[in-house]
Amino acid sequence: MGSSIEGKVAVVTGAASGIGKAIATMLAQAGAKVAIADLNEAGAQVAAGEIAATGGTAIGVAMDVTDEAAVNSGIEEIRAELGPVDILVSNAGIQIVNPIEQFAYADWKKMLAIHLDGAFLTTKAVLPQMYANGRGGIVIYMGSVHSHLASPLKSAYVTAKHGLLGLARTLAKEGAKHGVVSNVVCPGFVRTPLVEKQIPEQAKELGLSEEDVVKKVMLGGTVDGIFTTLEDVAQTVKFLCEFPSAALTGQSITVSHGWHMQ
Ligand code: NAD
């Protein structure tokens, strides 16, 4: 029996790199037609090309998830090229670390715009396609262990990631009668460019060696001192995409080597 993802149209934002790219690749391997929507257009085209080279179906789409017009035209382009959207994985994100009293207001707004406005705008753009004729759909937000816990220096990130739980739960209630389910995936630290950048930054702010930032700050709370992998997160998203009912909706699933236990 093929995967229930076979032939579905999936949009993954921020999929030119890291976790989003791994999710797009795994969904394409399961037979989805995937749109790689990213600010980094060249990266999106490269990622789509890599999927196509292994026999999958993928297109790269330039999209700044904080720009309503760009989101709407990008989602329309995807509908025109691949068909109506069945799966949205709202994943695009960045990190800015600083203590609150030094956190630039512009950086705070940028963080909330990418993580929260981006999730809202992409959801709003795909829902009419999912609601039409009761087609239904799956919306997955990329949260974090920081959807449940706080860490110093990450006020905007922690606030935004907590906020995604609220959006997912509201959509779970509104979308139910249209067959739309909505969940949040909450990874621990995964060694992507987003995390590599933080290691020296946190070492400087916290007065630790880079080795200690990894060992104590990033992995200190895990049960085994091991990074979560791209595949771990992609596998969790795939599981949610294949899950057959609304028994799992409005939930968050943490994938973090026991760093946070719900
Ligand atoms: P990454 O830096 O490897 O990839 C992020 C992608 O988002 C990039 O391709 C970037 O171009 C894109 N992007 C940034 N701003 C955008 C915008 N305005 N519009 C469209 N695309 C934009 O990062 P990653 O580690 O793969 O992170 C992906 C998601 O996973 C983020 O939401 C992040 O918060 C979350 N997350 C990461 C970790 C981790 O440890 N890496 C842990 C938990 C959650």
Image (cartoon, rainbow, N blue to C red):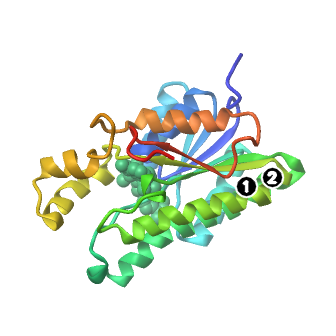
Q: Look at label 1 and name its amino acid.
A: Ala
Horizontal side of residue 44 vs 87, given as left or right: left
Evaluate whether residue 41 shows in this view. no
Real-space Cα separation, disc 2 to disc 1, in angstroms: 6 Å
Decide if residue 165 is on the left or right side of residue 7.
left
Disc 2 element: helix
Q: Position of residue 25 (x, y in %)?
A: 50, 34
Callout 2: CB less than 8 Å from ligand 1:
no
Q: Quadrant where the N terminus lies?
A: top right
Residue 122 is marked as: none
Task: Residue 176: give its label.
Answer: 2
Helix, strand or loop at mark 1: helix
**Side of 118 where 125 appears, left or right:** right
In which image quadrant can residue 200 be found? bottom left
Please tell me whether residue 14 is drawn above or below residue 67 in the rendered image.
Answer: above
Q: Name the residue that disc number 1 marks.
A: 172
Residue at the far right in the pictured view: 133
